[in-house]
Amino acid sequence: MAKEIPSRVMELINNPQSVKILSTCSVENSLHSVPLGSLSAPSSRSIVFAKIMANETHANLENAQKSGGIVSVLAVKGEEAYQVKCRPMAFDTSGPAFQAMRAKLSQKMPLHGVWLLEPVEIINQSPGPDAGKRI
């Protein structure tokens, strides 16, 4: 079931100065994590990012989508950090999400598509008494 992203978490995800890391798992159960500058939360129920090169990430997302697997987004800025566990929902190569991403990126970047993720769990990972708390 989709989880709504609170506004403070959306602000962190959408802040261009935040570091956003996507972690996926291969069919061999090997963890793969990559920083994604294009990652954003256009609504409280979705996270999107561009597939520019990320072939291993893309393969892992396709596998997670087929198997019902979960991936993890970690957004960090300073001492504020949130993990959003997500279900891969779609890979769009046209349409509104693709066009919106194309408008954000340099025309020199090879945009192959846009992944749409559905949040299913949000965890405060900031240092302090709320670390590990589900939101």
Image: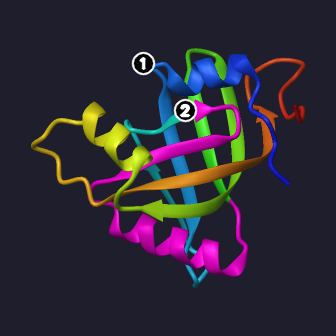
- Pinpoint residue 3: horizontal percent, then vertical percent: 81, 42
Q: Quadrant of the C terminus?
A: top right
User: Between 97 and 56, which is closer to the camera in this rendering?
Assistant: 97
On the image, which quarter does residue 126 sit in? top right
Residue 35 seen from this side? no
Q: Is residue 103 magenta?
A: no
Provide the residue span drawn in magenta: 42-70
Q: Which residue is pictured at 70% across the width and 42% down the height?
A: 84
Count of numbered labels shown in the rendering: 2
* In front: label 2 or label 1: 2
Determine whether 17 is above or below 106 in the image: above
- Neighbour class for label 1 at 10 Å: few (<14), some, many (≥20)? few
Q: Is residue 32 above or below residue 14?
A: below
Disc number at residue 42?
Answer: 2
First in residue order: circle 2 vs circle 1: 1
Report the side of 126 relative to 16 (left or right). right
Q: Which quarter shows the N terminus?
A: bottom right
> Is 83 left or right of 113, judged from the image as shown?
right
Which residue appears at 53% of the width and 68% of the height? Answer: 61
Amino acid on which disc 1 is placed: Gln
Residue 67, given in percent of the width and then of the height, sits at: 69, 80
Q: Which residue is mark 1?
A: 17
Alpha-carbon neighbours of circle 2 within 10 Å: few (<14), some, or many (≥20)?
some
Residue at disc 1, secondary structure:
loop
Task: Give the camera-side residue of 114 and 30.
Answer: 114
Mark 2–mark 1 distance (CA, rounded to whole Å): 17 Å
Specify whether residue 69 is painted magenta: yes
Does residue 24 appear anywhere in the picture?
Answer: yes
Vertical arrangement, residue 3 with respect to residue 71, above or below: above
- Extreme residue toward the front, this view: 95
Give how far across and how far down residue 9 sits, in percent.
Answer: 68, 24
In the figure, is residue 24 to the left or right of 82? Answer: left
